[in-house]
Image (spheres, rainbow, N blue to C red):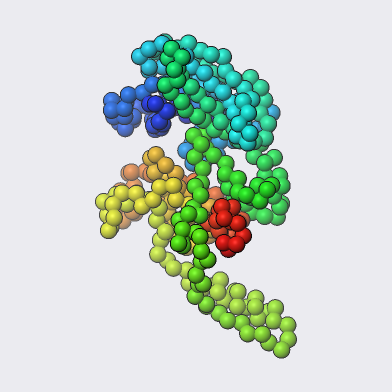
């Protein structure tokens, strides 16, 4: 089945339409004037905010089907750009566009492994008044081929060949943010020592079993059953509305709720423990139906063990650890 995502844009800003006939879409169409309606089309690529937009290498580029809501005749042009070196690898024919008209921007050529950006521009009498971009990744398996086969790595953020993290975007260019600036003292100093739970003193003989016993003892300690809740709190509790947007729960343990906000994403990667839905059973308000965020590797931790520490290393080097 061909994947399609429809968006309305105004000056390059994106407003995702969740159901063309929905009340929200009707409200937005009244309040927010748009320049273009854009359908991103590809036979296999997923077009969901927060999920990687991936195509097979050697295949076709995605197409853009566009309807003009602009009140003047304009010129529309699209380019496919390889993100690594900003090289233009494909270009659409220049299309003159009248109000209400529709057209399809197609791009000749085949994809090589890597991350790409489709750059869309509209101009009037030689002056560019609109720019927007759409993203996709070709050959994810090839990009990840250098990773150890016995490792468990996320599909959307993982160490590259040079050791720095690689971030795989969704079709709108969103990816997991760099959190290294938000750590202890802005990530520029050493992290304080955590509380010691078990101390293993050296013995007269081989200490392997004693060390292993200590590890197992700590691993069996009770997990704090206070939920990690990344969700819409509605009007209950001490705070209202969404508790977080563009949050990542990385290698967490315990109970986790992770929902997707309307205009952002939350990620749950490598969570070990219970996955709870994001509504209140007792209050019977599951009618809101907020969907899950991006979940990956539920029940098994991923590598690296700490996303924060790895991002900090990428930014400041080994001396920060």
Side of 219 relative to 259 (left or right): right
Rendered residue at 51%/12% (across/down): 95
Q: Is residue 317 visible?
A: yes
55 in relation to 259, above or below: above
Q: Residue furthest bottom?
A: 204
276 or 41: nearer the eye? Answer: 41
93 or 207: nearer the eye? Answer: 93
Residue 171 coordinates in the image, percent (x, y): 52, 34
Q: Is residue 59 visible?
A: no
Rendered residue at 27%/58% (across/down): 238
Q: Residue furthest right?
A: 205
Q: Quadrant of the N terminus?
A: top right
146 or 275: nearer the eye? Answer: 146
Residue 186 coordinates in the image, percent (x, y): 46, 58
9 in relation to 50, above or below: above
Q: Quadrant of residue 291?
A: top left
Residue 94 coordinates in the image, percent (x, y): 53, 13
Side of 55 relative to 76 (left or right): right
Residue 75 coordinates in the image, percent (x, y): 47, 14
Q: Quadrant of the C terminus?
A: bottom right
Rendered residue at 62%/60% (across/down): 318
Rendered residue at 53%/52% (across/down): 269
The tally of labels here is 0
295 in relation to 108, above or below: below
Side of 284 relative to 109 (left or right): left
């Amino acid at each position: 089945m061909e994947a399609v995502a429809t968006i309305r844009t105004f000056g390059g800003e994106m407003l995702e339409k969740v159901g063309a006939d929905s009340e929200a879409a009707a409200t937005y169409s009244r309040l927010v004037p748009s320049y273009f309606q854009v359908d991103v089309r590809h036979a296999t690529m997923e077009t969901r905010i927060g999920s990687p937009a991936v195509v097979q290498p050697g295949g076709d580029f995605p197409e853009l089907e566009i309807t003009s809501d602009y009140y003047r005749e304009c010129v529309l042009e699209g380019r496919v750009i390889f993100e690594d070196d900003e090289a233009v690898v494909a270009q659409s024919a220049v299309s003159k566009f009248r109000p209400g008209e529709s057209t399809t921007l197609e791009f000749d050529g085949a994809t090589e492994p890597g991350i790409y950006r489709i750059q869309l521009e509209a101009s009037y009498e030689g002056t560019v008044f609109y720019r927007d971009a759409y993203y996709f990744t070709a050959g994810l398996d090839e990009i990840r081929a250098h990773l150890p086969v016995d490792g468990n790595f996320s599909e959307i953020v993982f160490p590259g060949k040079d050791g720095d993290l690689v971030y795989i975007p969704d079709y709108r260019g969103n990816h997991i943010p760099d959190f290294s600036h938000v750590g202890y003292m802005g990530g520029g100093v050493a992290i304080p020592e955590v509380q010691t739970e078990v101390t293993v003193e050296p013995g007269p003989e081989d200490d392997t079993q004693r060390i292993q016993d200590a590890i197992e003892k700590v691993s069996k300690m009770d997990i704090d059953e206070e939920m990690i809740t990344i969700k819409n709190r509605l009007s209950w509790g001490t705070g209202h509305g969404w508790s977080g947007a563009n949050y990542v729960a990385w290698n967490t343990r315990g109970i986790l709720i992770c929902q997707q906000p309307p205009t952002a994403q939350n990620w749950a990667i490598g969570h070990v423990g219970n996955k709870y839905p994001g509504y209140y059973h007792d209050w019977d308000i599951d009618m809101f139906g907020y969907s899950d965020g991006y979940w990956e590797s539920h029940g098994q931790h991923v590598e690296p063990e700490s996303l924060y520490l790895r991002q900090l290393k990428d930014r400041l080097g080994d001396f920060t650890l």
